């Protein structure tokens, strides 16, 4: 039964025997002794940042969900403790190892690798089918969140959003998790398992294939046919996971069948050797020489004072299918509007937020640091430099002002990459001349309210779309001087400042929408030429630099709409189209592979052409 523990009830050693992992990615872990539980491990987490108002609620949600989880391949949690400068998660003590350490220190037999893959797949499958009403999306499948028991069983750490984030989760611009993210991360785990090399940077498919080919050649020279067969099997499963061509249930079934074919004798022999290695380094906590955890000064200063957080678990916690809402604002309806509306995709309801200080259309916006930021736009035919913000956490009732942009812009787009906002190109005047189109990439830091120019687009453009993925800003489509629509796609690396053209789209698109979901970039709708509005969708794979035309089309041709991702689905809101197409919300589910027109019709006074849409995330993991 999950409980809240007093830190004074847990005792730990002052020497190295009290430390399981000194600087582990998911937190310093201490071996402790509890009168009732016996020997346990306490994962010590650093205190939350001051700008995280959702921490207390997140811990409460974690408490109520985790107490119902019970699976042999998920690390058992006994409860939480809180103190002034941090908090701890009390879990089963294990003298095995963290998986990322095992990868680098031990040579694993291929049949054992198969067993380890099966263990993790079983854990993910359990979470994805946790309840008849919803599934749990982990969102952080990575080597640092895996531990091994004394008998080398994989156990997944799941703390409902309190664990380390995987590379894929960190790079998700909307901070949205889905089942597909988990399966993709499992594919990365398989690559690490096969190569026994941690993936520290975004995977390069070419280098990945080269590495796997080298491993195959080595096995062939040793004439190890059985090992080669296991490698080929794991590689096939890996690519299907990375290419989003399967689900975790199918993966688990494949692994189960493969294990049955191969038996367990070789797995057992390899385990015995590794277990002996681990047990030779096993430390035993001296229960006579321990100190109460609440007075221990390492890894945090833990004075015996009143905790910073007084958390009493509520009687009930409402678990929603998604913890994200969609905000759309501004637009043109005869004149510029100040409307700001929030849509909840879980309840299919709309409600008004405080109006903008300045009515504007064709503006840019993003959600960051618990605030909605709105940039530029156009009023009375002229682009704006002004910036407004609305802090949701502080329940602001009016929009505040921030420092002006370096260049007045309308008809651009905003993308968040690693906590900074990027605005590429846009329109600086009436587009009567080439000089009215900008190539400048403006970067905004909301922490210090500062702007800087970090680079330039290769093609001047306005009314284009952009998406962020793995440190790169991808800019596509748009309109140039003389109303020419573009197919061109280019990227700008925000780290190296390098840029290059990529494979262009199949058709020209201006006033299009774009989102990044599950490692793919989607180009939605738009205008191909005057009086030709599109309902087609293209999908770009950054790993292969290839576009594919999606079979499923939007319900209606549409342009100048807002596009975003929430709950692992793509939403297209408002805009201009045929047969009043802009007065509704469309959603695309990549699992069901279908566009659906939601029942909620948008009030004509709340939505208009050239609206801007963002996803407001509370940073909770999604529960479907």
Image (tube, grey):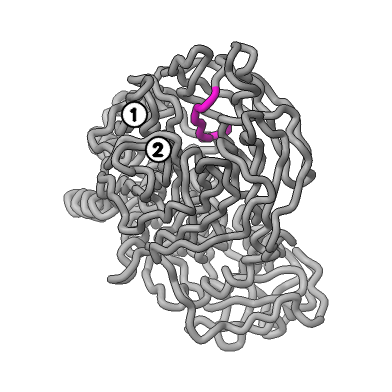
Compared with 450, 530 (above or below) is above
Range shown magenta: 462-471
Contact (Cβ within 8 Å) of mark 1 with mark 2: yes
The answer for how far apart the CA atoms under marks 1 and 2 are is 9 Å
Q: Is residue 41 magenta?
A: no
Residue 259 in view: no
Mark 1 secondary-structure assignment: strand
The x, y position of residue 517, in whole percent, is: 42, 42
Compared with 104, 135 (above or below) is below
Q: How many marks?
A: 2
Image quarter where the C terminus lies is bottom left
State the mark number for residue 533: 1
The x, y position of residue 307, in whole percent, is: 75, 79
Q: Is residue 518 rendered to the left or right of residue 409?
A: left
Which residue does the image show at 42% across and 45% down from the upper left?
574
The answer to which quarter of the image holds residue 122 is bottom left
Residue 408 in view: yes
State the mark number for residue 506: none
- Residue at the outermost front position: 334
The answer to which quarter of the image holds residue 310 is bottom right
The one nearer the camera, 43 or 125, is 125
Which residue does the image show at 38% across and 26% down from the upper left?
527
The x, y position of residue 179, in whole percent, is: 36, 53
Which residue does the image show at 50% across and 73% down from the upper left?
77
Report the residue marked by disc 2.
576
**Upstream in the sequence, badge 1 or badge 2?**
1
Query: Mark 1 Cα within 10 Å, few/some/many (few <14, many 20+)?
Result: many
Q: Is residue 10 rendered to the left or right of residue 351?
A: right
Mark 2 secondary-structure assignment: strand
Which residue does the image show at 67% across and 65% down from the upper left?
395
Q: Is residue 409 rendered to the left or right of residue 280?
A: right
The x, y position of residue 41, in whole percent, is: 59, 70
């Amino acid at each position: 039964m999950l409980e809240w523990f007093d830190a004074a009830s847990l005792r730990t050693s002052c020497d190295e025997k009290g430390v399981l992992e000194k600087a582990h990615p998911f937190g310093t872990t201490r071996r402790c002794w509890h009168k009732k539980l016996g020997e346990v491990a306490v994962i010590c987490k650093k205190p939350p940042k001051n700008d995280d108002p959702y921490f207390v609620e997140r811990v409460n949600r974690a408490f109520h969900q985790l107490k119902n989880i019970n699976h042999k391949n998920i690390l058992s949690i006994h409860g939480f403790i809180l103190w002034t400068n941090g908090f701890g998660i009390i879990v089963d003590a294990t003298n095995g190892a963290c998986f990322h350490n095992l990868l680098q220190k031990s040579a694993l037999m291929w049949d054992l690798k198969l067993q380890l893959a099966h263990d993790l797949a079983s854990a993910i499958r359990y979470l994805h089918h946790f309840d008849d009403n919803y599934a749990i999306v982990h969102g952080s499948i990575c080597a640092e969140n895996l531990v091994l028991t004394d008998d080398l069983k994989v156990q997944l750490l799941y703390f409902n959003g309190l664990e380390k984030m995987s590379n894929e989760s960190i790079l998700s611009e909307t901070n949205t998790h889905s089942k597909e993210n988990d399966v993709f991360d499992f594919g990365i785990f398989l690559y690490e398992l096969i190569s026994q090399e941690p993936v520290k940077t975004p995977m390069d498919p070419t280098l990945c294939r080269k590495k796997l080919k080298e491993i195959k050649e080595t096995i062939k020279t040793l004439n190890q046919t059985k090992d080669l067969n296991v490698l080929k099997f794991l590689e096939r499963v890996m690519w299907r996971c990375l290419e989003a061509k399967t689900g975790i249930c199918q993966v688990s079934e494949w692994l189960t069948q493969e294990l049955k074919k191969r038996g367990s004798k070789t797995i057992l022999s390899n385990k015995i050797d590794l277990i002996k290695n681990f047990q030779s380094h096993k430390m035993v906590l001296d229960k006579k020489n321990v100190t109460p955890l609440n007075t221990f000064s390492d890894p945090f200063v833990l004075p015996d004072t009143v905790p910073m957080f007084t958390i009493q678990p509520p009687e009930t916690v409402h678990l929603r299918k998604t913890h994200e809402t969609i905000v759309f604002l501004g637009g043109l309806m005869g004149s510029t509007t100040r409307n700001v509306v929030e849509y909840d995709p879980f309840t299919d309801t709309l409600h008004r937020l405080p109006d903008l200080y300045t009515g504007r259309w064709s503006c840019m916006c993003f959600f960051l640091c618990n605030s909605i930021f709105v940039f530029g736009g156009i009023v009375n035919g002229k682009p704006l430099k002004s910036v407004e913000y609305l802090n949701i956490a502080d329940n602001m009732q009016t929009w505040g002002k921030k420092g002006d942009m370096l260049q007045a812009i309308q008809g651009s787009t905003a993308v968040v990459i690693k906590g900074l906002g990027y605005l590429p190109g846009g329109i600086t005047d009436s587009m009567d001349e080439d000089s009215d189109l900008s190539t400048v990439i403006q970067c905004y830091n909301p922490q210090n309210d500062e702007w800087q120019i970090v680079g330039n687009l290769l093609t001047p453009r306005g009314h284009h779309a952009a998406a962020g993925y793995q440190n790169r800003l991808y800019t596509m489509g748009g309109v140039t001087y003389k109303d020419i629509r573009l197919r061109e796609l280019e990227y700008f690396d925000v780290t190296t400042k390098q840029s290059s053209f990529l494979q262009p789209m199949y058709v020209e698109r201006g006033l299009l929408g774009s989102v990044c979901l599950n490692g793919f970039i989607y180009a939605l709708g738009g205008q191909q030429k005057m009086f030709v509005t599109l309902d087609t969708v293209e999908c770009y794979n950054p790993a292969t630099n290839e576009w594919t035309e999606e079979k499923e089309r939007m319900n209606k041709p549409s342009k100048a709409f807002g596009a975003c991702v929430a709950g692992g689905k793509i939403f297209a809101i408002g805009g201009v189209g045929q047969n009043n197409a802009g007065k509704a919300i469309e959603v695309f589910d990549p699992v069901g592979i279908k566009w659906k027109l939601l029942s909620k019709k948008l009030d004509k006074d709340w939505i208009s052409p050239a609206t801007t849409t963002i996803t407001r995330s509370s940073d909770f993991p999604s529960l479907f």
